[in-house]
Image (spheres, rainbow, N blue to C red):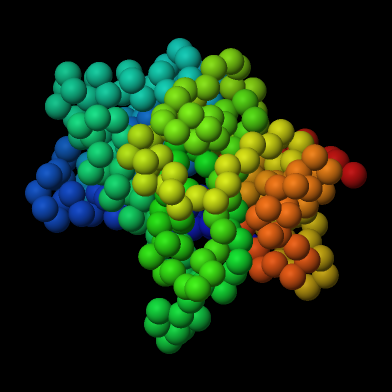
Amino acid sequence: MAKDESGRFGLNAFKLLGARFAIETLLHDGSIRPGATLVCASEGNHGRAVARAARDAGCACRVYMAHDAAPSRVAAIAGEGAEVITVEGSYDDAVRVMEAEARSNGWSIISDTAWPGYERIPRLIMLGYTHMLDEIREPGAGNREPDFDFLFVQGGVGGLLCAMASWCAFHKRERSPRVIGVEPTSAACLQASARAGRPVAVTGPLATTMAGLRNREVSPPAFEALLPIVDAFMSIDDVWAHEAMRTFARPLDGDPAIDAGASGSAALGGLLALCREPSLAAARRQLGLNHDSRVLVLVSEGVTDPALWASHVRTHP
């Protein structure tokens, strides 16, 4: 099964669920007012979501991005009315520049990653994300138990993974779904932190086409909450995300096609790798994944980089 977020609110990703919930909550309690300037750092989807939610709330918006962000993602954010500021370095560098400029100018930060002293809004964003799994329930089913044995989720800074694992823990049953976080090999900050038992940053080039998961550092509160309730952390090479993109685009007879980007396909990429990679046979056995398992994968984004999608799907046999 796939939970397809590629068409959410016409924004091509799930992120508006969190950004809108957080901003509406802050407006309601007076923490921000119409006309305020809202700022964030982003690789693409979160920035576009904050820009849309800010515009709807009558607020200005500034989005900070790494200098090598795909032009299509920059254009999508600017198209929502936000001012885009590119920063030399990575997403994590953009976070630091954004935080410093927001503090100097009195702007309100709407970030999905947290740091000491800035934790409430990322938690509101994560709470908004949980609506995704509320939607998989059948109408009138009330508190029906989850109808899947495994849930594969994109990693990133940990907010989405924390939200999904928390939902599963809250809707506990005799055998709760096993939750697996999936990250790019070059940006596996959650996996590295899980091994260390504390937040650690990864080093080296962030060489991955899974741009939405291109992070060196976890969000500490999200990591602290998810560590005891996530069953496994895995990292995959880009080839698995690209294979998942093709699988979504060319489904089995009777299944709908999904046009998903590399980040959006990462969860399925993790499942494909776990099922097909001989070196992961022991992990499959330990997790209990087999032909009878009911698996849910999240499709967190659609095609946000058309050139990349075309090169790995349309022109690929």
Outermost left residue? 30
Residue 52 lies left or right of residue 5; in this view the side is: left
Is residue 52 among the parts visible in the rendering? no
Quadrant of the frame with the N terminus: bottom right
Can you tell which quarter of the image residue 9 is in?
bottom left
299, 315: nearer the viewer: 299
Give the x, y percent position of residue 48.
42, 41
Outermost top residue? 88
Residue 42 lies left or right of residue 303; in this view the side is: left
Give the x, y percent position of residue 174.
50, 73
Q: Is residue 59 above or below residue 1?
A: above
Q: Is residue 94 above or below residue 299?
A: above
**Residue positioned 38% across, 65% down in the render:** 170
Residue 194 lies left or right of residue 186; in this view the side is: left
223, 137: nearer the viewer: 223
98, 34: nearer the viewer: 98
**Residue positioned 68% across, 37% down in the render:** 236
**Residue positioned 44% across, 44% down in the render:** 227
Give the x, y percent position of residue 312.
78, 39
Quadrant of the frame with the C terminus: top right
Residue 295 lies left or right of residue 216; in this view the side is: right
Give the x, y percent position of residue 69.
53, 26
Q: Is residue 104 above or below residue 267?
A: above
Is residue 154 among the parts visible in the rendering? yes
**Residue positioned 58% across, 15% down in the render:** 204
Q: How many marks?
A: 0
Outermost bottom residue? 140
Can you tell which quarter of the image residue 6 is in?
bottom right
67, 150: nearer the viewer: 150
Outermost right residue? 317
